[in-house]
Image (spheres, rainbow, N blue to C red):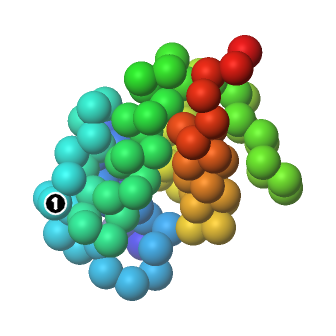
Amino acid sequence: MLEFSDEEYASLCSTVADDGCSNPTAFTDEVGNTWCADCQHRGEFINWGKARSFPAMEIHPYAMAQGAYYWQVTATQGDEDRVWSFLSLIEMLDATTEVA
Ligand SMILES: [Zn+2]
């Protein structure tokens, strides 16, 4: 198993996907992570968080603290179920009008 520096790691496509991700150049998110087409949703996840100052998120059974670090870790290391759960929450939040 290769070891990567934090900087190299950040530029890698999802390392949790077992299949592919060898050519992470299809999509660059707003914090500079690059993703393959199959992992583009992870970059879009980061972009959504960045636009909202990386809020805390919770959707059973997952929870994420507020802050860019947690969003980055989830995007780059979270398994697919975790990432898609947050994305489904994001979709719900986007579908509702801003009622604070
Ligand atoms: Zn990928």
Q: Where is residue 53 in the image (x, y as percent from the top left)?
A: 51, 17
Q: Which of 16 and 1 is in front in this view?
A: 16
Which quadrant is the C terminus positioned in? Answer: top right
The image quadrant in which ligand 1 is located? bottom left
Q: Which of 78 and 27 is in front in this view?
A: 27
Q: Residue at x 46, y 45 (%)?
A: 45
Residue 78 makes an appearance in the image? no
Write down the residue under mark 1: 26
Amino acid, disc 1:
Ala
Q: Nearer the viewer, residue 13 or 42?
A: 42
Left-right relation of 53 to 29: right
Q: Residue at x 17, y 69 (%)?
A: 23
Rendered image quadrant of residue 88: bottom right
Which quadrant is the N terminus positioned in? Answer: bottom left
Residue 7 to residue 87: above or below: above
Q: Position of residue 35 (x, y in %)?
A: 27, 57
Residue 60 to residue 21: above or below: above
Residue 96 to residue 68: above or below: below
Q: SS class of the residue under badge 1?
A: loop
Rendered image quadrant of residue 82: bottom right
Left-right relation of 76 to 100: left
Local packing at callout 1 (Cα closer than 10 Å; few below 14, some 14-19, many 20+) is few
